[in-house]
Image (cartoon, rainbow, N blue to C red):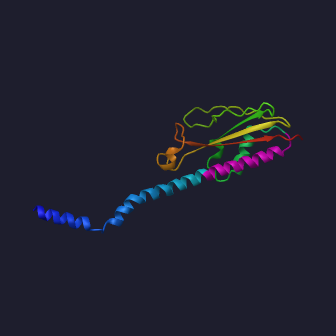
Amino acid sequence: MIAGIKRFLGRTARDESGAASVEFVLIFPVYLSMIIMSVELGFVTMRHTLIERGMDIAVRDLRLGTGTAPQHAEIKDLICENALMVADCKTKLKLEMTPASMFAFQSLDTTPDCTDKADEAKPVREFTPGVANQVMLLRACYKFEPFFPDEFLGSALTKDSSGEASIVTMTAFVQEPI
């Protein structure tokens, strides 16, 4: 009986017919997670690029505009019109704009005020239209739901209580006089 078990174990130990399956089982999850992380990162990068593009075009229109003080809704509409393929932009984008002094520069608060579905709607944190020749700081925060919020790259993103991550972009511009 023991000799039979030794022969069976010896034969099984020398058999290499399942070696490729073992390698596949060990390596495939790593490759699959890399592919999924690449897709998630690609969409995050695309959203960020499109929001930056929208802000660049909106700020260019503001700089070269008529010299009137831009209003919150106008700037938000401009950004969302030019940020193509960004889902639900007008409801998930929050703007902050404040004037800045060239001599005593003070940036915006380090923590952006983003929208949060779980909280009550907050009024605009600070949105001060500037005057001619004044440096203005504009920050946009866009909330989005990761495709895989609890796995891979989605688990590494900082999310709020509703499970949404944020993309923050900031720019500065000078309002040209008329």
Q: Residue at x 65, y 34 (%)?
A: 110
Q: Where residue 45 appears, x then y in whole percent?
A: 61, 51
Task: Judge from the rendering whether residue 152 lies leftward or rightward of residue 61; answer left or right.
Answer: left
Q: Is residue 83 magenta?
A: no
* Residue 106 percent location from the top left of the image: 73, 32
In the image, is 79 to the left or to the right of 158?
right
Q: Which residues are magenta?
A: 45-67
Q: Total number of numbered labels?
A: 0
The residue positioned 17% from the left and 66% from the top of the image is 7
The answer to which of 161 and 87 lies nearer the viewer is 161
Q: Is residue 143 above or below residue 10?
A: above
- The residue most toward the right is 178
Q: Residue at x 23, y 65 (%)?
A: 12
Position of 167 with respect to 178 (left or right) is left
The stretch drawn in magenta includes residue 59? yes
Kindly identify the residue that appears in the image at 56 percent across and 33 percent down: 119
Question: Which secondary structure is most common in the magenta stretch?
Answer: helix
* Above or below for 71 versus 79: above
Residue extending farthest to the left is: 1
In this orientation, which residue lies closer to the viewer: 168 or 58?
168
Q: Quadrant of the N terminus?
A: bottom left
Q: Quadrant of residue 26?
A: bottom left
Give residue 84's position: percent from left, percent from top: 67, 53
- Image quadrant occupied by the C terminus: top right
Percent coordinates x, y for residue 141 in the rendering? 64, 41
Q: Nearer the viewer, residue 29 or 116?
A: 29
With 135 as the anchor, is 25 left or right in this view?
Answer: left
